[in-house]
Each structure stands twice: as structure tokens, then as C-alpha cells.
Image: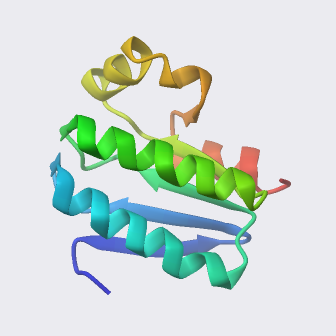
Amino acid sequence: MDHTIDIEFKGAVALVRVKKSDLGPDEAEKVKEAVRAIESKGPKAVVINFSLVEYMSSVFLSALMELYKELENKHIGFGLAELNRKNLEIIKATRLDSVFSLYASVHDACLALQGQ
């Protein structure tokens, strides 16, 4: 597995944390590969942890949308946690806050998505 991504399970929720501050096309592919690899482990939900992320590109946003659609088709929940103010504004400006479940903390995400 790539060293820029941590994957951890909290019960039935898979937590994916990207350990880079700028997320572009390379990181988009790495996150998609990581999420697709853990799908076989049967998570009820996947949460992307943005605690270390300062910037995400439009390519990365597109990758999140692609993952959301794939997981939704498999009845696997999807959420984003710990977005900084700038990234949260991007999500809201693109109206993706009406698509993605957003959480202030990974803990909140796990509590909300555990029962999906």
C-alpha cells in the first residue's frame, strides 16, 4: 500500500486518511485504488479523513464523486471528515454538500455511518 495513505477500520467503517497537504491527480488515483481495494473487506461505509489536507484539486473532487457513485451502487456509505474551512467552502460552492455526508470529526462520521 502507498505510504501517503493510511487505512484503518473502526468497526464496519473504513477510514482513509491521505497524508499529503495538496491533493491532485496522483492522489486522486491513489485514493480510488485504496478504496476499491478495501471494498472486498465489506465495510458498511468509507470515510475520507481530510485532517492533513490543505488543498484539493478539481480532479480530486471528480474522483470523490466517482467513488461516491460506485459506493452508492454497492450500498456502502460515504462521508468526508475534518475538512478545513477552505475545502469546506469548495465543497459548498460546488454544491457537493448536498451529495456528500460531511462530518466535523472522524468520530462523528463513525457514529453516524456505523449503522448503515
Measured as percent of width and height from the top left, residue 52 is found at 25, 50
Measured as percent of width and height from the top left, residue 9 is found at 59, 74
Is residue 66 rendered to the left or right of residue 108? left
Is residue 26 rendered to the left or right of residue 95? left
Total tally of numbered discs in the picture: 0
Measured as percent of width and height from the top left, residue 27 is found at 23, 60
**Color theme of the render:** rainbow
In the rendered image, the quadrant that contains the N terminus is: bottom left
Up-down relation of residue 56 to residue 77 (above or below): above
Is residue 12 rendered to the left or right of residue 25? right
Is residue 27 rendered to the left or right of residue 38? left
The residue located at (60%, 48%) in the rendering is: 69
Up-down relation of residue 68 to residue 87 (above or below): below
Pick out the residue farthest to the right: 115
Looking at the image, which is closer to me, 57 or 83?
57
Measured as percent of width and height from the top left, residue 74 is found at 74, 62
Up-down relation of residue 56 to residue 29 (above or below): above
Looking at the image, which is closer to me, 85 or 41?
41
The residue located at (46%, 53%) in the rendering is: 48
Up-down relation of residue 102 to residue 48 (above or below): above
The residue located at (49%, 69%) in the rendering is: 35
The residue located at (50%, 81%) in the rendering is: 37
